[in-house]
């Protein structure tokens, strides 16, 4: 064991010496990867998890599912730093990386706005570009405020918030987004009220009857679900009973960019929430 | 005599194959490690001074901390699963029997599922650390409880009815399946992915701290199982025949069941569900050298270790720098091979 620490310690020293050149980054989780790009550090990325969207044509290796990383696979990329949320794992792989002198940066995850702000601030600190981080967060906040203003104006006019549900269907029974999902966060950021929030956490199938009692005013779907169904009429046929809800009667189905909903909130959440608010309240 | 020679040759071949696959497992991987690195590492172990030691540190660390423990875990898990499979097939006099039939695997899966979902409900910071210990432990507990239940259902004053145990195993499997279904329903996305990956198995979590525990337990179990080879041979003739041959059949059964439950429980709890090794390996051996457990058991253990290592090497390199779950590889390798053997021999098995 003693020898092991010696090996690790000397290795850290040489890793530190190499760091003067461009840092080689592996980013885990779409939310994290997007922030790294937004902070202008994207050219340092040499590997990312399967869900992350990276620059096309760039030499960026896919390193697998974020909770099932491989020690040796990662080390073969000669990385200096791995950045991910606290979902990243398994823990033993992170231990191996640390022993090999790789810096492991673990950021808070989750679907709360505070998490996103903390990710941006901490990453900005890591790259010593605090100014850029502040700008990025300010731009997210500005758009979210605009969305909230739109929602408030609409609520003042009609007297009640809009009931919005998020539906996901990739073949089989459609699933609704409940509490603790990025979709729920999106609905609330757009000033809506998610009637499925009180019913369950995560994504669950619902019966046609409970959908009727939820009485959504708006049905939000991801682009992929919308394209699968082909049209608004296709979405309204996914479950019997949808057509009898307020949203079904008025045909208010709104498609959003769902890549921003995968793997925690991304810095694009401001754009997506504002777009949704505009679609909901100015239709 | 001819047969005896064939058997000896086969076992000798397997005894050579195992170290070869171990060496293969140590030299292959996504980080390049040269022969010089290995020589340097051995010199370093022996306390000799090595030139340019610093440059070699990463290669050494990969071998010492990642590949060696992983190789040893693969050997010990593969051989234990295969030996347990051999014992089960003998005990149940049923070539379809594998450790899952007495409920160990399904119970262990349920236990692990409960662990993943329960710990997943705790605050995020605690999850990762807690899961490392609770999931294997609950998997083991789950496997053991189901085995005891199956055994109790199958046992009356007249002894243990193997047929009833088989049916009970199927029933318990269905019950555990329903339990897994409930867990899948209440789980959130993260837990779901964890459940799925756990069910596909991995050797990636191997560490020296674990191995110190597991290797002695599993080796003792394997020796225990192999030492019951004569009893298993007698059981092949039928239970009353075995009794007439002077074996205490009830005691024999209890011992075999306990050892298998322990072996599979520990293996599953550490590496997840790795299918097919326990079923296919003893079969391959039986088809080649016949059903004499004195040779079948050790040969199965040797082949099981080698097979799992080969599967793991493939799992590591095909999608590098990511990694395939090993359960997929064992099934992909094992099932077609098994089918081709069945095809060739279909005239001979009743």
Image: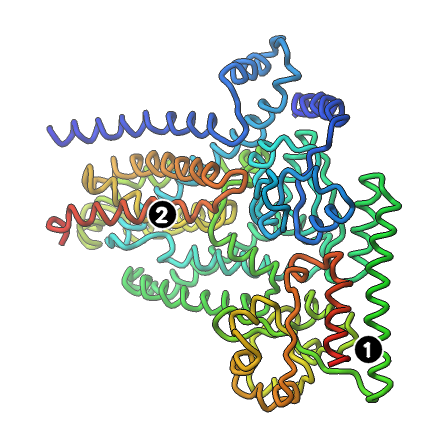
Mark 1, Cα crowd under 10 Å, few <14 / some 14-19 / many 20+, is many
Q: Can you tell which quarter of the image residue B227 is in?
A: top left
Q: Which mark is residue A151?
A: 1
Q: Can you tell which quarter of the image residue A182 is in?
A: bottom right
| Left or right: residue A113 compared with residue B259 | right
Q: Nearer the viewer, mark 2 or mark 1?
A: 1
> Looking at the picture, how far across and down is residue A67, in whole percent?
60, 49
> Looking at the picture, how far across and down is residue B61, in whole percent?
60, 26
| Left or right: residue A83 compared with residue B322 | right
| Left or right: residue A44 compared with residue B141 | right
Q: Does B116 appear above or below B235?
A: below
Mark 2 on the same chain as mark 1: no
> Looking at the picture, how far across and down is residue B307, in whole percent?
36, 37
Mark 1: which secondary structure? helix
Q: Does B339 appear above or below B103?
A: above
| Left or right: residue A74 compared with residue A139 | left
> Looking at the picture, how far across and down is residue A210, in whole percent?
60, 85
Asked if labels 1 and 2 touch by Cβ distance under 8 angstroms, the answer is: no
Viewer-side residue, A37 vs B251: A37
Mark 2, Cα crowd under 10 Å, few <14 / some 14-19 / many 20+, is few
The residue lying at 16 percent from left, 30 percent from top is B4
The residue lying at 84 percent from left, 58 percent from top is A139
In the picture of the structure, the residue carrying the numbered disc 2 is B332
How far is disc 2 from disc 1 in space, using C-alphas? 54 Å
Q: Is residue B173 visible?
A: yes
Q: Quadrant of the N terminus of chain A?
A: top right
């Amino acid at each position: 064991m003693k020898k092991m620490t010696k090996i690790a310690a000397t290795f850290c020293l040489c890793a530190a010496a190499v760091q003067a050149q461009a840092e080689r980054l592996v980013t885990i989780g779409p939310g994290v990867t997007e922030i790294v790009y937004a902070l202008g550090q994207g050219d340092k990325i040499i590997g990312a998890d399967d869900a992350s969207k990276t620059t096309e044509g760039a030499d960026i290796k896919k390193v697998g599912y974020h909770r099932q990383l491989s020690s040796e696979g990662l080390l073969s990329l000669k990385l200096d730093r791995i950045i991910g949320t606290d979902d990243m794992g398994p823990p033993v792989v992170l231990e191996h990386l640390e022993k090999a002198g790789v810096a492991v940066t673990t950021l808070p995850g989750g679907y709360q706005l505070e998490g996103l702000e903390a990710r941006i601030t901490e990453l900005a600190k890591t790259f010593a570009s605090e100014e850029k981080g502040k700008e990025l967060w300010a731009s997210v906040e500005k758009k979210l405020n605009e969305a909230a203003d739109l929602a408030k104006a609409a609520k003042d006019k009609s007297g009640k918030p809009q009931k919005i549900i998020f539906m996901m269907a990739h073949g089989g029974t459609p699933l609704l987004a409940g509490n603790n999902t990025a979709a729920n966060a999106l609905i609330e950021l757009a000033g809506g009220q998610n009637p499925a929030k009180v019913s369950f956490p995560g994504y669950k199938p619902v019966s046609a009857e409970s959908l009727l009692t939820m009485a959504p005013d708006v049905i939000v779907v991801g682009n992929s679900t919308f394209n699968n169904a082909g049209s608004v009429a296709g979405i309204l046929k996914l479950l019997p009973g949808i057509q009898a809800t307020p949203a079904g009667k008025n045909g208010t189905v709104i498609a959003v960019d769902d890549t921003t909903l995968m793997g925690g909130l991304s810095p694009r959440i401001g754009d997506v929430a504002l777009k949704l608010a505009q679609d909901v309240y100015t239709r | 005599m001819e047969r005896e020679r064939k058997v000896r040759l086969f076992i000798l071949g397997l005894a050579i194959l195992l170290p070869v696959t171990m060496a293969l497992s140590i030299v292959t991987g996504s980080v390049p490690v040269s022969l010089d690195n290995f020589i340097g590492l051995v010199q370093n172990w022996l306390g000799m001074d090595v030139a340019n030691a610093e440059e070699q540190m990463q290669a050494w660390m990969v071998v010492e901390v990642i590949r060696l423990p992983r190789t040893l875990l693969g050997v010990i898990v593969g051989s234990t699963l295969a030996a347990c499979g051999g014992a089960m097939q003998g005990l149940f006099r049923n070539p379809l029997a594998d450790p899952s039939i007495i409920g160990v695997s399904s119970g262990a899966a349920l236990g692990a599922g409960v662990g993943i979902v329960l710990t997943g409900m705790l605050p995020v910071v605690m999850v990762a650390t807690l899961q490392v210990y609770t999931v294997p432990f609950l998997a083991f507990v789950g496997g053991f409880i189901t085995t005891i239940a199956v055994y109790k259902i199958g046992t009356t004053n007249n002894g243990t009815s193997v047929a009833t145990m088989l049916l009970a195993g199927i029933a318990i499997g269905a019950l555990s399946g329903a339990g897994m279904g409930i867990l899948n329903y209440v789980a959130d996305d993260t837990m779901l992915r964890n459940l799925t990956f756990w069910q596909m198995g991995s050797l990636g979590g191997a560490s020296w701290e674990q191995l110190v525990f597991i290797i002695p337990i599993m080796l003792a179990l394997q020796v225990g199982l192999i030492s019951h080879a004569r009893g298993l041979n007698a059981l092949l003739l039928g239970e009353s025949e075995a009794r007439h041959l002077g074996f205490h059949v009830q005691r024999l059964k209890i011992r075999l069941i306990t050892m298998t439950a322990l072996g599979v429980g520990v293996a599953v709890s550490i590496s997840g569900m790795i299918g097919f090794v326990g079923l296919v390996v003893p079969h391959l051996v039986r088809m080649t050298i016949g059903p004499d457990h004195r040779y079948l058991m050790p040969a199965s253990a040797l082949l099981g270790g080698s097979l799992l290592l080969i599967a793991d090497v493939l799992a590591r390199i095909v999608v590098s720098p990511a990694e395939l779950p090993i359960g997929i590889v064992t099934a992909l390798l094992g099932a077609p091979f098994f089918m081709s053997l069945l095809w060739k021999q279909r005239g001979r098995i009743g």
